[in-house]
Structure formats: structure tokens, C-alpha cells
């Protein structure tokens, strides 16, 4: 029997539909409220944040690097300047697959694999978004044309005109002015990332490094609007960069050339100072190098040639070269003896050709093995008598000797603005105990008195010590910068003047140094022949390798680079010094015979006019008198050079 069909319950279905409609309405309402709430949060609460992000998608701040300050010599000759260069840059955000773009560049310009690796190295450095990275400098016209023709293959690649450093004088001022080079990874971490945005190079050595902050200037900015491809559409705001300060150096390019010519092809250095001001008039270190090679990045091959050269052209001998000063410090030792009371100008020592300490049989040889007989201070300085200064050093003792020589700046940094300067070494018993764990021996005091042994000084220190004798103890730190941005630099760490018990001690030593040059028995009399002015000088010949007791120096049995160094210091005119010269010639062997003429040639270049006459401002203000044995000495002595 068939089942009956149930009747529909319309009321129940109506309630079910209503509940579903209400649930749907609640869901739609909740979803609408959530959407409106989110929209309110984004559009109202975080409006500023998202507005900035949106603006940054089309507005970018690009740095404008400042123009580096120019460096001049004292006469206005340009030593370091800036010139425009067409360089290739890459903006990674515009390039898409930048590696593929770089491969295209290598192929189009026919570059090497090393160039490709260098590109990758440059791109690894820290940078800001949309900031172009310079990949190639000094593009040729042909390379620029190839990039322009193939621009559609090279998105993100641009050719930009940028300033690069140039040194018109080349190698002449490489060690004093220094050079700039590309910022390396280590430097990029220490430099101010704001100030150096867009800057490719930084000072590496010399004045370029010491005055980097002043020379660099302050970066400028451009706020630009770009399209979707990163192309600049218009400039919204522009802030000009502040160029670096110009620097005028005390160096004289004419004297620098004269010093280089006098030194010739020999390895060595020359330092010239004005004793009245401390201005460095010339500073030569030979051999030198062309600093322009470093500006945009030196090749591995070129750098290896400079680095591995046996002559060390990259080494600044004037500031970093450490040498035994030899007899050039005897005037300072004489000052110490006079001021301390250890000797007098009239005290005499007998020289048989050697010196022996009491109760010791070791002979400390004089350079003149036959001896000079009885010598006083004048004769000791004039003849550079080692025996006299052995005896004086023994009377002084190492402590007093150390203290006096330190007052002259030996064994310490003396300059105001020379970044690379080495301190040298002025030994003492305390130093030897600390470094060698040994006691100080009496014989070491003797050889310290003639500038040998552990003592090491730079040519700049020798020039400054001699300048103090010329200036009668008035300390003026040597400096290269005459003005920075039109303002003279200030010595923030002045040294105390050397005050003696009697100012006549300065005159006594000056007198002895004049005898070196103008007395018929003077050790460097040949260098002063025909001079139109009085010269006070002192030669020095310093051993490079030790010679055993009882043996004599034989140049023919000594390797060229083991031969003695030749040194000479002097100032002129002796009565009112205007120039101090320090010369060091590596392995030159004879200070008076080899380095002395170099000093004379440099002094002539500074004190004489183009016609070979003494300039009026350097003429002797007081005529010589017969009572003065030095001034009365013949101006043109005839003799045979030693």
C-alpha cells in the first residue's frame, strides 16, 4: 500500500530562510565594517607613511659631489687641480638584469675579464638606491660613441662628466702633496656616509690626506622626479655643494726643481726650511712616482712595478726614512756640552786617531786614522773630529746627552701637518731595558755622541735640529701649508724653546760650522768655494753595516747598497740664516764631498738672482771685521778637496 505524501510546513521553511538571510546580512555587514576599518587605517591613520612610500617611487634624492679644493705652491703654481672626465656609470635599479648588461658592455667595448671582475667589485660596495656607480673612467670618444649607439642594449648605463684629480707637476711633488685614490671598502666604513655620497676618491697620502676634511668640501643634493624606468623627468629641488678649501703651500716649485737637479739620479732626500717661520721650502724624495696613476685606480701591473722596485719609489725618504745621522748632530752635542758645563770652547782633547775609555783597551777610531793632535771645539767641529766628541759624550753621560738631543726634536715627530712622518729613535738606558732587556754599555754612549749606534732620525728631523741652531733655539714646527682657505694654520702643540745659560753658545757653534765651510782645513771647504755668502754647515758619513774592530772601510769590497750614507746639513747666510738645508744620499759614502755640493747648489738657487748675484734681501747687514776670524777668512780659499 503506497505511503502518504507529507504536507509542506510553510511556516518552518519561512523561519529557516529568514535565519539564513539574517546570517548572510550579518556576514556582509561585518565584512563591510572590516573593509571600511582597514581603509580608514590605511588612508587616515597611516596616510603620511604610505604617502612617503608612494612619493619615493617617483622622487629620489641624488647627491652632487663637491669640487675638491685646489693646491698651490707659494708662488701660485698649481700643484693639484680638478679636470672633467667622461666616465661610465651604472644605476642598478634601472638596469634590470645588471649582470647581463655588464656582459654586453664588456663585449661592446672589447674589455678584458679583469675589467669584468672589477665591475663586480665596484658594485659590491655600500651605496644608496638609485645612486649611480662609476665603473670606468677616462672614456675615449670611440667608447662614448659605442655606448651611445648601443644604448638600447644597456639600460642603466650612462656616460657622465665628472671631476677627477690631476697633478700637473707629476712626480715633482708626489711625496709632499700626496695623491687621492678610489675609496676602498675599509675607508667606506669609516667615512661620513652623508658627506661622501657620490664621491669616488679620498686623500691617501701627503697633504691630500692630512687636510682631507678641508679639501673635500660638503656634498650637495638634487631632488628629482623619475618615471617608471628610473629616468629623471624634472628637478624638484637643488642644493649646491660647497667646494673644498684651497690650500697654498710654502713649497717653492723652482727650489724644488733645483733640489731635484742637485740630487740627480741618486737615491736620497732633500729638506729645505725657512728658520724664521718653519715653512718647508722644498721637500724631495728620490726616486719618486707619478701620482696621477692612482687617481682613477692604478693597474695591478703598474702598482706591482712600483711596489717591488728595489729603489722603493713609493717610500717617502724625507719623512719615513730612518737613518743614523752620523756627524751631522755634532753641533747639537757641542751645544749640550757647553750648556751643561761638561766642556768649554777652549777645552782641548788630544787626538792620536782613536779614543779609549778608562780601564778599557777597545779603540774607538777617529775617521782620520792619523789623528788631528790637540783640538778644541772649533777644530773639532771644523774637522768633524770623532775623538773629541767621544770624549765629550763620555763627559756628558747618556742621560744628559739623550735629554739635550731630544730638545732638538731628534727621535720624535716634529712637523705640524705631515701625516706620514716617522718618530725615529733616540735611545736611552730605559729604552734598551724595555726593548732589548739589556743594560746600557759605556761604549754605546760614545758612538751615540757621533750619531751612530741605535739612534735613527729622519731627514726632516735633521733639518729641524739644524734650524734650531740657526734660530738660536726658537722652536717653529716645520709645516707645508701656508694657508688653508685663506687662514694660516695654528700650531696646537707648540714645543718649548731651547733656552741656554749663555746665548753666546749658539754663536760659538755657528762659528765652528762656518769653519767647516770656509777654513782652509774645513772638511767641506770645497763646497763653499766661490760662495757670495757665508755658509754654516756640517757633514756626516754614517755606516750602513758595522765594521769589525781593527778593520777599515773598503768601498771596493762593499756592496753598493751597503756603503756609507752621505749626509749634510747647513744654513745660510750664516749671520742671518734664511734657509736651512738637509741632504741625505743613500750609499753616497762621503758627506762633505758628495752631499756638500748638493747643499751649496740648492742654497745658490734660493739666495742668488738669475744673474748669479746675491739678492739684496740676503746681503750681510753687518760687514765683517778683522776681529772675527771666520768673517776674515778668505772668501775663495784655494785648496785640494778631501
Image (spheres, rainbow, N blue to C red):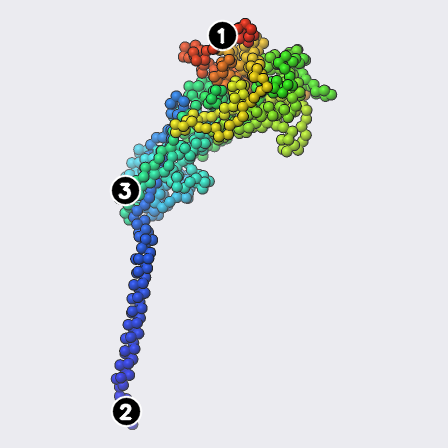
Instruction: Relative to 75, say whether 132 is above or below.
Output: below
Instruction: Relative to 537, say whether 131 is above or below.
Output: below
Q: Quadrant of residue 166?
A: top left
Q: How far apart in space, not on screen, are marks 1 and 3 (Cα)?
A: 73 Å
Residue at the spot 67% in from the left edge and 16% down from the top edge:
354
Q: In which quarter of the image is residue 19?
A: bottom left
Callout 1: SS: loop
Q: How far apart in space, not on screen, are marks 1 and 2 (Cα)?
A: 155 Å
Callout 3: SS: strand
Callout 2: SS: loop
Eye-nearest disc, 3 or 2: 3
Mark 1 — residue? 623
Instruction: Relative to 6, say whether 361 is above or below.
Output: above
Eye-nearest disc, 1 or 2: 1
Mark 2 — residue? 4
Closer-to-camera residue (247/624): 624
Res 235 label: 3
Q: Can residue 589 be seen in this view?
A: no
Q: How far apart in space, not on screen, are marks 3 and 2 (Cα)?
A: 88 Å
From the viewer's perspective, tell me whether residue 400 is left or right of residue 272: right
The quarter in which the C terminus is drawn is: top right
Provide residue 367's location: percent of width, then percent of height.
Answer: 62, 16
Amino acid at each position: 500500500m503506497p505511503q502518504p505524501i507529507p504536507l509542506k510546513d510553510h511556516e518552518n521553511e519561512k523561519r529557516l530562510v529568514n535565519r539564513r538571510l539574517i546570517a548572510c546580512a550579518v556576514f556582509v555587514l561585518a565584512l563591510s565594517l572590516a573593509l571600511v576599518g582597514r581603509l580608514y587605517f590605511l588612508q587616515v591613520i597611516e596616510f603620511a607613511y604610505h604617502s612617503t612610500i608612494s612619493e619615493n617611487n617617483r622622487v629620489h634624492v641624488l647627491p652632487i659631489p663637491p669640487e675638491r679644493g685646489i693646491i698651490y705652491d707659494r708662488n701660485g703654481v698649481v700643484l693639484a687641480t680638478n679636470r672633467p672626465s667622461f666616465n661610465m656609470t651604472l644605476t642598478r635599479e634601472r638596469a634590470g638584469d645588471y649582470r647581463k648588461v655588464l656582459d654586453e658592455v664588456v663585449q661592446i667595448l672589447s674589455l678584458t675579464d679583469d675589467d669584468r671582475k672589477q665591475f663586480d667589485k665596484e658594485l659590491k660596495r655600500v651605496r644608496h638606491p638609485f645612486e649611480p656607480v662609476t665603473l670606468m673612467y677616462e672614456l675615449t670618444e670611440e667608447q662614448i660613441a659605442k655606448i651611445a649607439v648601443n644604448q638600447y642594449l644597456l639600460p642603466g648605463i650612462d656616460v657622465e662628466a665628472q671631476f677627477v684629480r690631476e697633478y700637473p707637476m707629476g712626480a715633482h711633488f708626489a711625496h709632499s702633496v700626496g695623491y687621492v685614490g678610489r675609496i676602498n671598502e675599509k675607508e667606506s666604513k669609516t667615512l661620513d656616509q652623508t658627506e661622501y655620497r657620490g664621491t669616488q676618491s679620498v686623500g691617501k697620502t701627503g697633504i691630500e690626506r692630512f687636510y682631507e676634511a678641508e679639501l673635500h668640501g660638503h656634498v650637495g643634493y638634487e631632488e628629482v622626479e623619475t618615471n617608471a624606468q628610473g629616468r629623471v623627468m624634472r628637478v624638484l629641488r637643488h642644493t649646491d655643494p660647497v667646494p673644498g678649501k684651497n690650500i697654498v703651500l710654502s713649497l717653492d716649485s723652482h727650489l724644488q726643481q733645483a733640489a731635484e737637479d742637485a740630487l740627480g739620479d741618486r737615491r736620497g732626500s732633500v729638506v729645505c726650511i725657512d728658520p724664521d717661520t718653519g715653512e718647508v721650502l722644498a721637500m724631495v724624495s728620490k726616486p719618486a712616482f707619478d701620482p696621477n696613476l692612482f687617481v682613477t685606480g692604478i693597474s695591478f701591473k703598474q702598482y706591482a712595478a712600483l711596489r717591488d722596485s728595489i729603489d722603493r719609489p713609493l717610500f717617502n725618504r724625507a719623512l719615513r726614512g730612518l737613518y743614523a745621522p752620523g756627524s751631522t748632530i755634532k753641533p747639537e752635542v757641542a751645544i749640550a756640552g757647553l750648556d751643561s758645563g761638561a766642556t768649554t770652547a777652549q777645552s782641548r782633547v788630544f787626538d792620536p786617531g782613536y779614543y779609549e775609555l778608562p780601564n778599557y783597551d777597545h779603540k774607538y777610531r777617529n775617521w782620520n786614522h792619523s789623528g788631528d793632535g790637540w783640538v778644541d771645539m772649533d777644530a773639532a767641529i771644523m774637522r768633524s773630529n770623532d775623538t773629541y766628541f767621544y770624549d765629550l759624550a763620555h763627559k756628558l753621560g747618556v742621560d744628559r746627552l739623550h735629554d739635550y738631543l731630544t730638545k732638538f726634536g731628534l727621535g720624535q715627530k716634529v712637523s705640524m701637518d705631515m701625516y706620514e712622518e716617522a718618530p725615529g729613535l733616540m735611545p736611552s738606558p730605559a729604552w734598551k731595558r724595555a726593548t732589548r732587556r739589556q743594560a746600557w754599555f759605556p761604549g754605546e754612549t760614545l758612538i751615540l755622541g757621533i750619531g751612530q749606534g741605535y739612534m735613527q732620525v729622519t731627514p726632516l728631523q735633521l733639518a729641524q735640529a739644524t734650524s734650531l741652531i740657526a734660530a738660536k733655539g726658537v722652536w717653529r714646527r716645520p709645516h707645508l701649508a701656508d694657508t688653508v682657505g685663506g687662514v694660516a694654520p695654528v700650531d696646537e702643540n707648540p714645543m718649548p724653546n731651547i733656552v741656554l745659560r749663555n746665548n753666546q753658545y749658539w754663536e760659538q757653534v755657528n762659528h765652528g760650522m762656518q769653519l767647516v765651510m770656509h777654513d782652509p782645513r774645513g772638511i767641506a771647504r770645497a763646497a763653499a768655494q766661490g760662495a757670495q755668502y757665508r755658509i754654516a754647515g756640517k757633514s756626516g758619513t754614517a755606516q750602513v753595516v758595522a765594521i769589525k774592530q781593527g778593520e777599515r772601510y773598503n768601498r771596493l769590497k762593499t756592496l753598493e747598497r751597503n756603503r756609507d750614507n752621505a749626509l749634510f746639513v747647513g744654513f745660510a747666510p750664516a749671520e742671518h740664516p734664511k734657509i736651512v738645508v738637509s741632504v741625505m744620499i743613500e750609499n753616497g759614502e762621503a758627506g762633505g764631498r758628495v752631499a756638500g755640493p748638493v747643499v751649496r747648489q740648492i742654497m745658490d738657487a734660493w739666495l742668488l738672482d738669475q744673474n748669479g748675484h746675491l739678492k739684496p734681501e740676503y746681503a750681510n747687514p753687518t760687514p765683517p771685521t778683522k776681529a772675527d776670524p771666520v768673517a776674515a777668512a778668505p772668501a775663495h780659499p784655494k785648496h785640494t778637496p778631501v
